[in-house]
Image (cartoon, grey):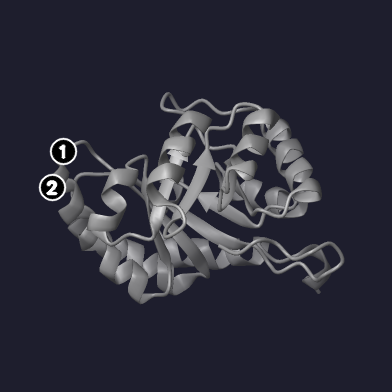
Amino acid sequence: MASRPKQGDPRPAPRLYLITPRLADTGAFAAPLVAALEAADVAAVLLRLADADEGTLIKRAKALGEPVQRQGVALLIDGRPELVARARADGAHTTGIAAFGDAVEQLKPNWIVGAGGLATRHDAMLAAEQGADYVMFGEPDETGARPAFAAIEERVSWWAEVFEAPCVGYAASRAEVAALVAAGADFVALGDWLWAEPALPATLAAIAQDLKLPETIA
């Protein structure tokens, strides 16, 4: 998840960042996940794991790590930086600036550390200063609540104008994807709603059109 180009350089098309449901059976999820990876240009998969003992969590992560990484896609673990090395994952995603700081101490410079749950601009700037590989805006919290979409667009636009670290914008539906691209998101995150789609490859093919930069659309 490389930094965005310097000002004046061409902007690459945004890529997808897929977020799994909170999984207890990662083996059963492998088939739909691989189908998604084969249908779209995906940069990273964020693995959310249901609670279990550490050994079980590591086995679950490894069950998805091999098929994900075989596709050239980064596997990130949600909120459990201590599992990253043993699960052979590529990094961790954290929620909140305090959790991000703890993960940086554990994982940098060998693994990816992303920062989400950033309530203020100040928190986002702190994450950048501490070496975040990306920041995420707009994801729902544990209760499902998220900021108004206009506020998410504003935060993504502000970040894209000021910072080089990549920005992930969370889309709660396909309808939000194009707007996040227009705001300047480098990656667009898709969560639980995606996996409920009855025709997953077709949905991702349609979303691929939404990811095109405005100047490239004929």
Q: Amino acid at mark 1?
A: Ala
Circle 1 Cα neighbour tier, 10 Å, few/some/many (<14 / 14–19 / ≥20): few
Percent x, y of residue 111: 42, 58
Circle 2 Cα neighbour tier, 10 Å, few/some/many (<14 / 14–19 / ≥20): few
| Residue that appears at 63% across and 44% down | 128
| Residue that appears at 59% across and 45% down | 135
Q: Amino acid at mark 2?
A: Thr
| Residue that appears at 56% across and 53% down | 133
Percent x, y of residue 71: 39, 75
Note whether 195 is above or below 216 in the view shown: above
The residue at which mark 1 appears reads as 52
Contact, CB < 8 Å: mark 1 with mark 2?
yes
Label ID, residue 178: none
Asked whether, in this view, residue 21 is left or right of residue 6, the answer is left
Note whether 54 is above or below 9 in the view shown: above
Percent x, y of residue 117: 53, 33
- Cα separation, mark 1 vs mark 2, equals 6 Å
**What is the secondary structure assignment of the residue under circle 1?**
loop
Asked whether, in this view, residue 140 is left or right of residue 192, the answer is right
Q: How many marks?
A: 2
Query: In the depicted view, which residue is nearer to us: 181 or 122?
Result: 122
Q: Dividing the image into 4 quarters, which one contains the N terminus?
A: bottom right
State whether residue 170 appears in this view. Answer: no
Note whether 159 is above or below 28 in the view shown: above
**What is the secondary structure assignment of the residue under circle 2?**
helix
Query: In the depicted view, which residue is nearer to us: 56 or 50?
Result: 56
Asked whether, in this view, residue 111 is left or right of residue 177, the answer is left
The residue at which mark 2 appears reads as 56
Which of the 4 image quadrants contains residue 125? top right
Note whether 67 is above or below 80 in the view shown: below
| Residue that appears at 45% across and 46% down | 191
